Image (tube, helix red, strand yellow):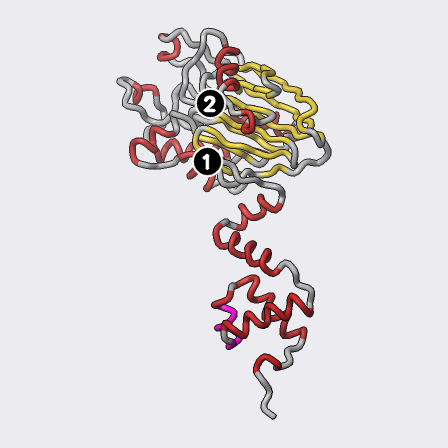
Amino acid sequence: MKKNKSSVVVSNERLEEVVSYYVLHGAEKTSENFGIKPSSLNRYIRKAKKDLNVADIERSSSLRRIAEVYSDKEIEAIAKGGRVSPGQPIIPVVNLKGERTRIGVMGDIHFGSKYCLYDLVDIAFKEFESEKCDIVCQVGDLTEGMSNRAGHVYELDRIGYHEQKKVAIEYMSRCPAPLYAIDGNHDRWFVKGNGAIIVQDICDAIEHAEFLGHDEGTIALGDSATVRLWHGEDGNSYAVSYRIQKIVEALTGGQKPNVMMLGHVHKSMYLYDRHIHCYSAGSFQRQTAWMRGKRLSSHTGFWIVDIYVNKNGVAKTTGTWYPFYM
């Protein structure tokens, strides 16, 4: 008597081979590769669930669909605990060795400006290496950019997108630890002028660098703490602390990080407010003529910050400010 198709015996080895391929490549490619109809494939999947106890086939299929959307680097971040955040699809996770993460913090560098302290960048990198920093964070205005402000072009020693990108890559490629960066208002003058995202292009050219986003980006320290990099387009306040307080005050409760590294105003300060450890990052650009005319000082130097994380979040931080006197 002729056997019904549904009663055809399929070995466990065959089931495993077909279903494993399906999980990785999807139904269409599996049917084509093994020469089986979609209805037969569905039967294989049902039988695998029953005979092989493969209860997570649908979950594996969902992971395959995720793999079609995200890069290998992003999937690796998700696997390590990376989370989805508005405006930033993946939050990179920094794996901890113990409870402490040591971070080198670099404020506004302004590569391309005549006032950029190029030598200080190398000094900072040597100190980051000597102190065994786990990562380095750069909080925007990596480049000077080119504005339409009258006379601004005369403050540049590197003119144009290509030249500023080139010198930034030259210096930042010497960073001794994984580098995370956001862009700032000066960097985005290139975006406004011709659509070029210069900080992303710089990071793409450096193997150990990652661009986190426009104006802000977040890093997860393990499973229980986050560090927010922040630039902003606001101005200086009458007191250094006041700007930080107003930024923290504006954060929605559920979106608060544990630690913030802030750029833009070229000021150095530590402040603890609303349970957030805030470090205003200072600058690698000495006071410009424009800043002097506006009575704005520039705190030149850099931070090394130790963040201690436990299961409840950040237990404590300790920061060392390295001033560079002019």
| Residue 206: mark | none
Q: Nearer the viewer, residue 82 or 135?
A: 82
Q: Judge from the rendering whether residue 74 lies leftward or rightward of residue 50; answer left or right.
A: left
Compared with 211, 262 (above or below) is: above
N-terminal-most mark, 2 or 1: 1
Label 2: how many residues lie within 10 Å, few (<14), some (14-19) or many (20+)? Answer: many
Residue 227: horizontal and vertical position, in percent? 58, 29
The image quarter containing residue 290 is top left
Query: For the point 49% across and 7% down, which residue is it?
Result: 239
Query: For the point 41% across and 18% down, which residue is it?
Result: 234
Query: For the point 57% across and 82% down, which residue is it?
Result: 5
Alpha carbon distance from label 2 to label 1? 22 Å
Magenta segment: 29-36
Query: For the point 54% across and 27% down, which residue is it?
Result: 122
Residue 63: horizontal and vertical position, in percent? 56, 54
Q: Nearer the viewer, residue 86 or 94?
A: 86
Q: Is residue 117 visible?
A: no
Q: Which residue is mark 1?
A: 87
Q: Is residue 217 visible?
A: yes
Q: Nearer the viewer, residue 175 or 6?
A: 6
Of the residues shown, which amino acid type is indicated by label 1?
Gly
Q: Which residue appears farthest toward the bottom when viewing the image?
A: 1
Q: Judge from the rendering whether residue 57 lies leftward or rightward of residue 236; answer left or right.
A: right
| In front: label 2 or label 1 | 1
Q: Which residue is mark 2?
A: 108
Label 1: how many residues lie within 10 Å, few (<14), some (14-19) or many (20+)? Answer: few
Compared with 81, 190 (above or below) is: above
Magenta residues: mostly which secondary structure?
helix
Element assignment for label 1: loop
Residue 321: horizontal and vertical position, in percent? 60, 17
Compared with 266, 135 (above or below) is: below
Residue 320: horizontal and vertical position, in percent? 63, 18
